[in-house]
Image (cartoon, helix red, strand yellow):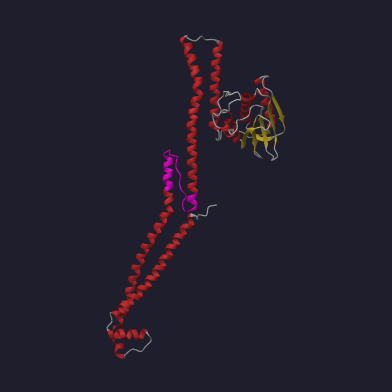
Amino acid sequence: MSRRPSLSILAAMLVSFTQIITIALLYISVDWYIDHVELSAIETLPDDARSAFVSLNNGEVPDQDDLAALVELYPQLEEMTEATPIVGVLGFGFALILFTSAIGVLLAYRIVAPLTRLTAAAEQIGKGDFQVEVEPGATKEVEVLATTINRMASELLALETRLKFNSRAVAHELRTPLTVLQGNLQGMADGVVETSEERVRALLLQTQSISGVVDQLNTLSLAGTADFITANTETDLALHVSDTVDLFQASAGPAIDCRMELLPAPAKIDPPRFRQALLALLENARKYAGEFGPIEVSTGVDDSGRSFVSVSDHGPGLPSNVEHSSFDMFWRSAAADGRGGGGSGLGLTVVKAIAEGHGARLEVGNRPDGGAYATIIFNDGE
């Protein structure tokens, strides 16, 4: 926890400090000035009157002639010692106000200076320059604001870097199928390439590939918005998993063996989005590990009371030290034989976005006995 004082406390301390300094200096200066005025007035008296004044001041009985001279000049002496201090007090007061105001302005500047740096940093961010770092100021509020701006600038810089990468990656993903389509269609139009059912089907496959990438990008663009997860249906995950796996098995054919171990797993889900995530996990397992054994799908409740759905395989698993990369857009794991396996590289990114839209989280890793796993864990009560 920060030990810096709050801005309100610091402002109150500043006001109190300037008031105390003003009063103390005014008292000292006025006291000195009154004594100085009194001594100056006495010095203007004739010797006999001054002698009588000194004797009276010391508690002695002055000479009668000296006392008579003092009495004659006393009204003038009283006027000098009463009127002059008032002018002095006003002068000293005005001078002290200027002095303490200068101190206050200096201290206030030291308090406000960090706000000026924060403003400059905000303007720099507003111009699109996210490489800023603001030092925390002297108060809690300024420190919190500086920390927030630094974190925001860092996140915006990371987002900008990721956006540029994703833009290049999207262009790269779409360039190949579009080039193939354009070349073949141009060849057919020019009569250079023979139009056949087989070639048309191959081109249709390319359009399906482009459509898949576009659909996945559209899903990611909706992540975090109110329209992304449009329903929360209280249900048993096992029922939806069973139906989805049956459909996947039917489309994949006998080459893929899916095995299910489904225990009750209550959760609130958006059924279409949940099926989309599960199909992405199944397709990922088929692509990278379908040749190495059965794909196992399980549901249930863990020791913490959280429902889950897990897809695991017996393939080569994830390469070491790259589990974190599995959620990066357009990241692909190479197969054991060095084949990348094709695809857009968006599968796990989409699954992660859907999981987070449900208030759940996606975990991936390698199984101790070989193969990889991907598990969506729903928070308790979600």
Q: How many marks?
A: 0
**Where does the image place residue 200, in percent across and percent down from the top left?**
54, 13
Residue 368 lies, in percent from the top left, at 67, 33
| Residue 229 can be seen, yes or no | no
Asked which quadrant contains residue 290, the reply is: top right
285 or 27: nearer the viewer: 285
Choose top left, top right, bottom left or bottom right for residue 65. Answer: bottom left
Residue at the spot x=43%, y=65% of the render?
A: 20
Residue 356 appears in the figure: yes
Task: State the image coordinates of residue 349 (x, y, percent, origin top left).
Answer: 57, 31
Q: Residue furthest bottom?
A: 64
**Residue depicted at 50% across the width and 27% down the height:** 170
Q: Which residues are magenta?
A: 117-143
Work out whether 72 lies above or below 153. below
| Residue pictured at 30% horizontal, 81% vertical | 75
- List x then y, in percent, for residue 204: 55, 17
Quarter holding the C terminus is: top right
Q: Is residue 381 magenta?
A: no
Relative placement, left or right, of 310 versus 11 is: right
From this view, report whether residue 62 is shown above or below residue 287: below
Left-right relation of 9 to 86: right
Residue 123 within the magenta-colored segment of the rendering: yes
Left or right of 116, for residue 281:
right
